[in-house]
Amino acid sequence: MKWFSCAITVVFWVATLSCASIKLQGEKYHPVTADGWPLTLEHFPPEAGSVKKKYPVILCHGLLSNRNYFKINEERSLAAVLAKQGYDVWLMDMRGRNDAGAPGYWFGKHTYTFSMDDYIRYDVDAAISEVLQRTGAAKVNWIGHSMGGIVAYSRIGSLGEDRIANLVTIGSPMLVAPLDRSMLTAYRMQGAMVMVPVLPFRPLAHIGTVVPSFLSSPISRILIYEPNTDKGVVDRLMVTSTNNIAKAEIQQFIDAVNHGGLISRDKTLDYRANLRNIKIPVLIIGGRRDHLADPLAVRDVFDRISSRDKTMFIASRAEGLSEDYGHTDLVVGKRVNEEIFPHILKFLGERN
């Protein structure tokens, strides 16, 4: 009987994996960073018949994710919607993601020893350089979800990046505080990190598709507001879009909690304080129910940047939307095409 139960579980898991495959596929490139890490860029050119826009768009994922996040909804995804509007779209995988060669847990040329500083200093630079070289454009539009926005804030503000023309951030805080009870629980678990070489969220996410109790864990509650996300989307997110997290990345967020804002690991750069150096057009989108990027933290960024052309939008019922949005449903929620994406298209359209 136990054997039969295990067999059913395996069959169900394999079926989930097959249903989670993404049909929307672009041409892939693997630029290498200055410190020798391969990345992945996936290209979706402007749709035939559309009016081509001035600058290409780079879409950058968050901490626990990869580029598949931006195409989970296939033809309704942000990548497809932008291409239909005439944008040259590039989905970015930062280092440590599978398509460019996953790091080893203990051994190999690359292991999980990187931090957010490496994303900011090397990965963003390599991605922008590759896109500009292949498109001939002078600058790019950058759209980042969660950490994908944080790395752009940090590079522009602290390293003087001038190749980003317009910036859209979605659920991207620079004030990292455990404002939510689940966040506080995760913060208190930091001591357990000494037991593992990397935080293995990718295999845990696969287990989560067949063990429903995983979905109710504190970490899942922080990231996923299920009432505003289709069940099939949640499964595809977990199977195709979940990534392991290097311990140095988590430590940097812990340091940010203790410091009162995001800083470099060597404590020489105060990324949050340097938000004042950002002067390009910025659209900041937050979710009223976002436990990771609380509206207070989103407002903190808005107040600190020096851009005269800046807009903040909190996705909520108070703004006439169908739901108070959480962290992931700002990109993959049930009604993002009617309620979130139009704000992005309007902002970019007026500046491209």
Image: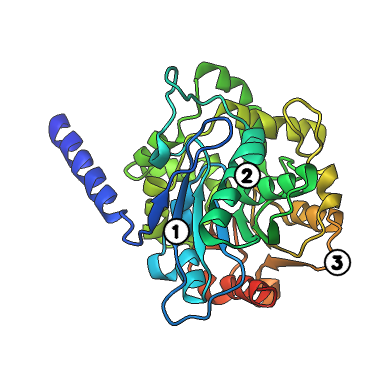
Amino acid type of disc 2?
Asp
2 and 3 marks in contact (CB < 8 Å): no
Percent across and percent down for residue 31 are: 49, 43
Say which label, 1 or 3, has the lower sequence index: 1
Tell me the mark number nearer the camera, choosing from 2 and 3.
2
1 and 2 marks in contact (CB < 8 Å): no
| Position of 299 relative to 120 (above/below) | below
Residue plotted at (30% across, 54% down): 21
Say which label, 1 or 2, has the lower sequence index: 1
Residue on which the image places disc 3: 308
* Tag 1 secondary structure: strand
Residue on which the image places disc 1: 43
Is 18 in front, or is 137? 137
Say which label, 2 or 3, has the lower sequence index: 2
Residue 59: name its quadrant.
bottom right
> Which part of the image, by quadrant, shows the C terminus?
bottom right
Residue plotted at (58% across, 74% down): 53
| Position of 178 relative to 42 (above/below) | above
Amino acid type of disc 1?
His
